[in-house]
Image (tube, rainbow, N blue to C red):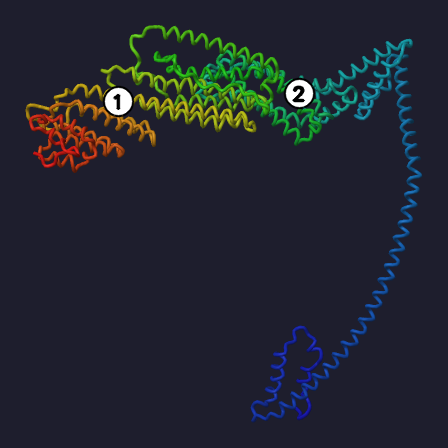
Amino acid sequence: MSLYGLDESIRQLLRLDRFSTVDFNAKDFIKQLRSTQKDAGIEDEVLDPKPYIRTFEAVLSELERLRDVAQHGEDAAGTAADGLRDDFNESVLGLATNVDNAVAQIKQLDEQVSDVTRATNFVGDRLERISAMHQKARTSRRLVEYYVSFLNRGECPELHRLWTSENPTDRRHCAQIVGQLQLLARKIGDIPGSEKAENDIDKFAEHLETHFVGLFQDAYASFDLLGMKEIAHVLHDFNGGASIVQAFVNQHDFFMQIDKIDDNSALHNEEMWAHLSDLKSGCPEFEKAISSLVDDVVDTVMAETDIIRKVFPQPAQVLTVFMQRTFAQRIQGQVSLYIEEAESRSALAHVRVLYICYHLIGVMVKTLKFHWSKQNIDADGELSLMLDSNFNDTFVMFMDKYFAIERRNLEQIISSTFQYFYNSENRHEDSPGPHKLQRIVTNEGSGSGYDTDEEAASAAETDIEDSRMDKFMRAVRLERGNTVRKRVSLPWEDPQLVLDDMRTVLAAFAEAVGREQVLSPSARIPHDAVELFNTLIREVGGSYINEALYRAIKGILKIPNNEPINWAFLDIVRRSANCVQMLAMFVRTVLFSMVRGMEATQNEMASTINEYIITAQDLCSELLSNVTELVHLRTVEAFQKQKPRDFAPKEHVEPNTSAVCRYVIECFTAVSQQAQESLSGENRQNFLVSLAGGLYNDLVTQIKKYRDINPVGGRILAADLHAYEQLVVSDWGILEVADSFATLKAIAKLFYADVQMLPSLLRDSRLARLKPQTLQMYVGQRHDFQSRNLHMLFLGKTGYRYGWY
């Protein structure tokens, strides 16, 4: 390295192209610059800074020179770029001007073309009309020639040639000409030979049609879809193709399967009819029979739809004839046979068969509609209207009387389910009548709810028949009531409310509602809902639940005194509560949904069901009140077996509870145990409080009857009272009477306490709250009241004479 210059290696590092590269790095550049010093062996010598300083000064000078060169190049490039940009802008402006000129020229040319088009449209229309007239004239000329040929010769060789041609276009043209010839022959007036010519043309047309129908049948037998399509189009152009459609339908295997068409095996299936007439059984056999018929129809129609679309020019026409034949031959006859047979079996079988047929065939109709809409066959809705019409025709004769049969079915189910109850000899004629909801007429519904006057008349006749039946049944009951009975049925001997039977009846109503939603018009559903509600409240709520409660109420007080009581009949309270709850829930969840949107009807139904619930609750309250009275009578009867001096035994006996006490406690225990099972909540508590209060009152009354009670008798009485208190306070938890029974026990203590203790008992115990006259009465029942001058206890100003012995 020279003293003031740069080495060649450093100059190589300072070339301008090294600084213009993308991967230039200043740190690497310094490292390379320093490495040149190492290569020169400078680091092995004693460090002398001058060479480094001179070298870096030279490097900086070179870098400044390179920067100036680069700046000069950049300025030159910028100047050149500005010039190019100006040239480009001028070119763009020039091109824009040229484009505007071209657009203006194109617009002018377009206007000229439009003018030419407007000028030639009139000519084109005239040419089209002239061409059409020319074609029509040629066709008319040929028709006249063909007609003249038939008129003069009785035949037309040209048409015969077209007919026998192998070209499908010629045969189609022949069919079109023959159809036009028939129209022409009918329009021609009376000219010689015209009638014969018309007959010859008709014979030729008939021969042509018969021939093509035969060809179609041969093609159908060999499943030649192309041949079938050709013939179908020819005959469609000839006369609309009605004959070929009939030929296709008539020879279809679906209408020739006699074993299926005349299959009445299900009509003789006694097991199936037994299931249909049994509320607790389903009807899978009949559903399977109808499903098989429906599936057969759907599968056949869907398969034939593809063939019909490929063969016939108007598939809707063929499908219409096919489905009309299907309904007439395969569906309507079967449905009528099943429904007529079901009508002879039972009302339940009748409505079930009607519902299953209506539902499954309705599903079939919806399936076919959806399939045809996907196939774009029923664009104008003609097929849908045809299906709906045939479906309605199938069931119209059965729908008018449906609800009357449904109501009779429910009444029969109620009668058969509660037959054991209705046949009871203990039915009371003075029982409260069921609350009946009158027919609701509101502005929200559709008048009377009947679609026709005939329906209203039919309903009126039904009401008259019901009224006659009610009168007859009342007469029968009156005759029974006048019959002298040897013995009154006891409450526990009467048929009880059966929850499973209640569920059975409500299930029948739920099934009927399901059928009602499908089979009745929407305008009739609210009216029918009210009818179902009336039937439910009248026949189930009144004649079953309320009647059972009323029988129990009246039967309780007719129990002979010496008859042991089976307190299990109290379970009727629980059963009736459950039945009422199920009935109310059914009304609110099921029947209310049928009158949704009719606020007045809903409010009336809600008011009626609430009134019925209150009536049932009142009957239960009356029943429990009568039970309390019965317990009171039995308690009084038991106490009457105690003589006034039973608590003054002459011999010393153990102070145990008396036999009467044990009997009364046994009776109360049996009642309370049954109440624990049959009652709940506040009802049970109130009932036990009533029993406890009645027992207390009976004890107070009975104690007042005792005379000459000695200490042994007093201890027996105290033991009895303790047992009663233990029962009602400790066992039952009736704290309301705890203080009263404690007072009775304190009174009993007066009968066996020493004379010296009497003043303190009268003064310091809970007896101090009683009136002196009352206490004197109880003390007067002691055997030593006279001998010990105990009346002296009550001579003081305050009623007592303290400290007397």
- Dot 1: what SS? helix
> In the picture provided, is 47 more to the left or to the right than 797?
right
- The one of 673 and 381 positioned closer to us in this rendering: 673
Q: Residue at x 30, y 22 (%)?
A: 627
Identify the disc placed on residue 631: 1
Q: Residue at x 65, y 91 (%)?
A: 54
Quick one: 725 or 398, which is closer to the camera? Answer: 725
Camera-nearest label, 2 or 1: 1
Q: CA distance from mark 2 to mark 1?
A: 80 Å
**Secondary structure beneath disc 2?**
helix
Q: Position of residue 331 (x, y in %)?
A: 59, 18
Q: Look at the picture and state if 22 lies above or below 748.
A: below
Q: How many marks?
A: 2
Say left or right for 713 vs 199: left
Q: Which residue is mark 2?
A: 322
Q: Is residue 764 above or below residue 435?
A: below
